[in-house]
Amino acid sequence: MSSFGSRDASVYVERFDLYTGNANPDLARSIGRYLKMDLGRAEVFEFANENIFVKILDNVRDRDVFLIQPTCSPVSKSIMELLIMIDAFKRASAGRITAVVPYYAYGRSDKKDQPRVPITARLVADMISVAGADRLLTMDLHQGQIQGFFNIPVDELTAVHMLSNYFRRKSLTNAVVVTDLGFAKRARAFAELLDAPLAVIEKRRVGNLDRAEVLNVIGEVRGKRAIIVDDEIDTAGTLMEITRALRREGVDEIYACATHGILSGDAVDRIAASAVREVVVTDTVRLPPQKRIPKIHTLSVAPLIGEAIRRIHLGESVGALFSSELNLVEEMLLWEEGDDNSQPASLVDPSRIGTTRGERCP
């Protein structure tokens, strides 16, 4: 018995397909390029009445399907595309459906912190499960407890190793890692990888506004190079508050990084006008051309997600991706989007992946 039905997992070894909705097709194509596979063909579009239509153009019966769809802007449309595509694959008799959701929306709505409010992160989890997904692959959830909202297996990747390796290669001396209490556990791992101390920001949110007030900086930061780390940068309001607090504490050189670069509203303008020297994010969320300013650097998580997909398909350990034995993350930083020849040969064995599909319809 396998976790996704009565059939043995070996049935799917030679049947492995990638599909994408419209949320971040560039990332999906990069993952396919890393795995040396074309994306499967599907029609996903919106009628004039805003109803979403999905048609899978390939035979997916008994296939191991990985659907790549972060729930980013426009959030409601991205979520509905994800749910409808899962339903389409289920009704097309796919063998197993893995929802690959690099960015999980509504992650901050994970508890009842006020009277009469929903736990929307749980609602989204229920919808994904009820739609027919057999498992979820995601990255850096806002809180780890969200995994427990699912009744299907969840694999949560982290970009902490990739981001820390990026800064380690910059050889910054006298560095200090700065984070808030919510991200402290993963930031501690980030600091250990850089062999740097950790400082924690105490903050509080002002009502239900996208704004936070910094109360204290806990730790020694004066005269150091600060690297602010978090799971996401949304409006950049919190980032600006932390930057101003660090400047008051005597920090002159400030960097920032996050897994998810939401960068909504005036975030890019705030970053451009700020004292932050560089902001590093990943491509879990598509960054449109107008937001690609020199201060913002994007790392591709395509090799990390692609390797996790390969391991899930073959029944191998996903956690081993982050073990010191394999040391794969350092190689992943060398992978350049769009250049198959730059892919480290040690990461993917094409003979173990299975059949490929044709190009996806526009």
Image: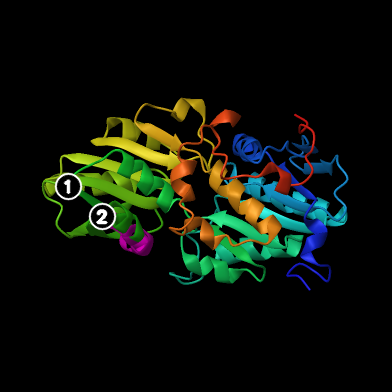
Left or right, 262 with reference to 44: left
Give amino acid for label 1. Asn
The residue that label 1 is drawn on is: 174
Residue 188 rendering spot, x and y as whole percentages: 32, 61
Mark before the other along the chain sequence, 2 or 1: 1
Q: CA distance from mark 2 to mark 1?
A: 10 Å
Quadrant of the drawing holding the C terminus: top right
Q: Name the amino acid, label 2.
A: Asp
Q: Residue at x 25, y 60 (%)?
A: 200
Place residue 12 in its image quadrant: bottom right
Q: Badge 2 is on which residue? A: 195
- Looking at the image, which residue is at 29% across and 38% down? 170
Q: Which residues are magenta?
A: 178-188
Report whether residue 197 is seen. Answer: yes
Secondary structure of the residue carrying numbered label 1:
loop
Say left or right for 179 vs 310: left
Q: Residues within 10 Å of mark 2 (few under 14, many from 20)?
A: some
Is 52 within the magenta? no
Circle 2 — which element? loop
Render colour scheme: rainbow
Q: Is residue 224 above or below residue 359?
A: below
Q: Residue 327 location, x and y as percent?
A: 45, 52
Q: Is residue 117 above or below residue 38?
A: below
Residue in the foreground of this view, choosing between 17 and 138: 17
Crowding near pointer 1: few (<14 within 10 Å), some, many (20+)?
A: few
As rendered, which of 72 and 179 lies closer to the eye?
179
Q: Position of residue 279 (x, y in %)?
A: 35, 38
Q: Residue at x 33, y 54 (%)?
A: 193
Q: Could you say which quadrant of the image residue 73 lies in?
A: top right
Which quadrant would the N terminus be assigned to in this image?
A: bottom right
Magenta: main secondary structure equals helix
* Residue 247 in the image, given as x and y percentages of width and height: 16, 44
